Amino acid sequence: MQRTMEGKPGLQTVYQAVQALYHDPDPSGKERASLWLGELQRSVYAWEISDQLLQIHQDVESCYFAAQTMKMKIQTSFYELPADSHSSLRDSLLSHIQNLKDMSPVIVTQLALAIADLALQMASWKGCVQTLVESYGNDPASLSFLLEILTVLPEEVHSRSLRIGANRRSEIIEDLAYYSSTVVSLLMNCVEKAMDNEKMLIKTFKCLGSWFNLGVLDSNFMANNRLLMLLFQVLQQDQTSSNLHEAASDCVCSALYAIENVETHINLGTQLFQGVLTLEVAYHMAVAREDMDKVLNYCRMFTELCETFLEKIVSTPGHDLGNLRTLELLLICAGHPQYEVVEISFNFWYRLGEHLYKINDAVLNSIFKPYIQRLLHALARHCQLEPDHEGVPEETDDFGEFRMRVSDLVKDLIFLVGSIECFSQLYSTLKDGNPPWEVTEAVLFIMASIAKSVDPTGSRGKSPQRNISQKSDRENNPTLLEVLDAVVRLPESVHIAVRYTSIELVGEMSEAIDRNPQFLDPVLSYLMKGLCQTTLATPSAKAIQNICCVCRDHMAHHFNGLLEIARSLDSFSLPPEASVGLLKGTALVLARLPLDKISECLSELCAVQVEALKKLLSQDPNNGLSSDPTLFLDRLAVIFRHTIPSVENGQTHPCQKVIQEVSNQKQFQSQIWPVMSETLNKHRADNRVVERCCRCLRFAVRCVGKGSAALLQPLVTQMVNVYQIHQHSCFLYLGSILVDEYGMEEGCQQGLLEMLQALCVPTFQLLEQQNGLRNHPDTVDDLFRLFTRFVQRCPIVLLRSQVLGHVLQWAIASTTLDHRDANCSVMKFLRDLIHTGISNDHEENFEVRKDLIQQVMNQFGQQLVSQILHACCFCLPPYTLPDVAEVVWEMMIFDRPMFCRWLETALKGLPKETSGGAITVTHKQLTDFHKQVTSAEECKQVCWALRDFTRLFR
């Protein structure tokens, strides 16, 4: 089979490719067919070939491929068709869907989407809904595909696949609202004719839900409509099938979502409110029949009801539409034995907590407190492991993830109940009773979730009232100390899961330990036992890390013990993250030691990792053993990242000797640079290892700052040499760190510029490849971070360099890149560059900088404005606009009259109509946007103007 599209292929060739795609037993054959068909879909021949395949309708596979291709072409390549062919395409598609309506539902859906997308883009097709209903509404055989078109049409209005623009979208929504009563009448006729036809009922409810979602139905008209009553009749009937039940439930949820602004839809809101409340009996029947699908559907509707009426529930609790029976329904669902049911309601409970927190009214909180207490009780029960569970709790399976979400929810709601009160009550259930192990474990799990908020200094501080009431307990809460004492005395005979969760609880109570250091020895002893046990090692390591982070001063006395743990890390059954976490805690404690001790202790801490790296470097590459150094590089990185001692001016940094080579090699066996250099050289082709080396060096340089000066020359030389052959973007990032540290040192500036120029040559060659920017976003990100550091530290050096012109051309080209980090770096570079010609806050050579920026703007200003405007309208997602607005703002501040002319020219270059003949942007909208931007007094006003204007092109 031919691989590339050299002219229009024959139908037989296309059939063969489709057959190969679906039926070739050889995976490589399927892959070749897929690539070839993908190329066909992108070619201009796809229109005619798809039409022919649908006309012949030889088999399901070829028709599905053709229908899917037609939809894709209309969505992405509609501009390829001349305007006079649009009507014939519409007629052809309508003919195909009528002829193929019985072949396969998936083909009908694809063709319906194609017709809907065509209708949205084809401005000359006026009143498409009316046309379709008149043509097919009275033909029972055509109703099925007509409903499919009318279902997907509202859904496609906000589709991201179509860039029809805000003007056309508004026009369409007005049109659909105008004809919505026609659609509702059609749906009522369908229901009357097909009361026993379940498939038709399902299609009717799906279509109605789609129109509800778009928000174009008249709510007063719908409030008393028979369709609404029918929905609730179907949902109340025990014998309703699962598929019909789901369609009706989806429709009710869509209706509830559509009336989020309850006051403007009060009649429909009242009908939906009363209708959903009638479903409680049906819910209990579904529970009795163990019909999980229906149970989940009812819970979805109850939750959506609460979401919709949340404002009423909070503002008028217990009255009218604020009736708290809604919360009762959710708590009934929380009582279901399957945790998947209660999980549906989590978002509502979050939102309720957020509302009550913002209102901050003690009386209001007291109304909802009993409901939250019952919810927490139910959640604790749902968190119980099975009685026959063996081993520790799984954290990565579905149930483990559910427990994590419970933990987050409890943290956000606990202020309503009172964390001290709740913690004490939970502990009482363990102390006063003798519950089964699974109940004990679940209670400990919930206690661990709220332990930090019980302790005022570690509190999430949700409620001022709560903090005032806890003032008397600020120094110590008796329950906390009693719990700590009880946990460290737990016998080893308890279920392993109980020990696991109790260790997690201890880790969450580190603030209490910090204020009660008498507990430190027994707690550390307890955790060390866990660390030595395979199944308990990970939570024990995390708990020790937490205690090190919070109790740094107290833990300084235990540093030798931490050093022993660090030396024996590989003897414990720890995953890499946990061992790195332990070293983080150790480094934080190390930074609290006296300065004269830090060098020696840091050397010992690093020595283990350095020796391991040396061993890997010296081993025979053919011995079959792993030579991967990333684990030890990560450990070194975390040590340097968190060893931040307090060093006075003039004092030698205690970490300096360890990082770089010094004359007295015997004293410091753990010097980092020689072994790092050798590791980097050995693994120079492996991006993963090189990235870890650069990360480690980054934190080492940051750790000692200018104390790493002796490293600069050898490090830059090696970076540049390796980068010529292997373009690892992390070298660019490391270069930006060096510029940040040394860029203001005049003696280093020329060397750093030479580094930049040497790194730019292979980088620009890489980006010049086909799709270079899109294929290498990390390189773009790190490259512009490097340029930005030059702008921030030594702008004149960059502005006078020969490389500047190339840098700006790449910056302008990169503005269209829709990669979040890369685009952010490009925009920050442009913003900071222009700002150097405006800001006169820290250097005496401001006039020089201003003149240099003026030269840049004279040469590149128009090109930059035009490209940025094009990128905003056609390439970039909305979340990038605040960064873009900052660039526009700086350009305007620098030279407003010139910017006004640039923007006017750029606006003239934008297309004013879509390929479907719809108006994209009017002359008034262009002039309004120009005025909004050029008269803006704040950057955020530019951002708002950009947001509104770019919607016209989306």
Image (spheres, rainbow, N blue to C red):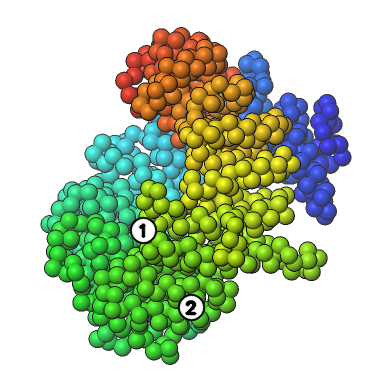
Q: Position of residue 319 (x, y in %)?
A: 16, 52
In the rendered structure, find residue 346 and report the number of the disc placed on it.
Answer: 1
Q: Secondary structure at mark 2?
A: helix
Q: Nearer the viewer, residue 792 or 870?
A: 792
Mark 1 crowdedness (10 Å alpha carbons): few <14, some 14-19, many ≥20: some
Say left or right for 468 vs 185: left
Residue at the spot 72% in from the left edge and 55% down from the top edge: 682
Looking at the rendered structure, which numbered label has been put on residue 324?
none
Foreground tag (1 vs 2): 2
- When the figure is inspected, residue 702 is found, relative to residue 528, above or below; the finding is above
- Which residue corresponds to the image point at 44% horizontal and 10% vertical from the top-left? 898
Count every numbered label the image shows and give the total.
Answer: 2
Residue at screen point 75% across, 67% down? 619
Q: Nearer the viewer, residue 846 or 785?
A: 846
**Residue 621 placement: quadrant:** bottom right
Percent x, y for residue 371?
Answer: 23, 64
| Residue 781, position as x, y percentages in the image | 56, 38
Query: Callout 1, which amino acid?
Result: Phe
Q: Which residue is mark 2?
A: 531
Mark 2 nearby-residue class (10 Å; few <14, some 14–19, many ≥20): many
Q: Residue at x 64, y 67 (%)?
A: 612
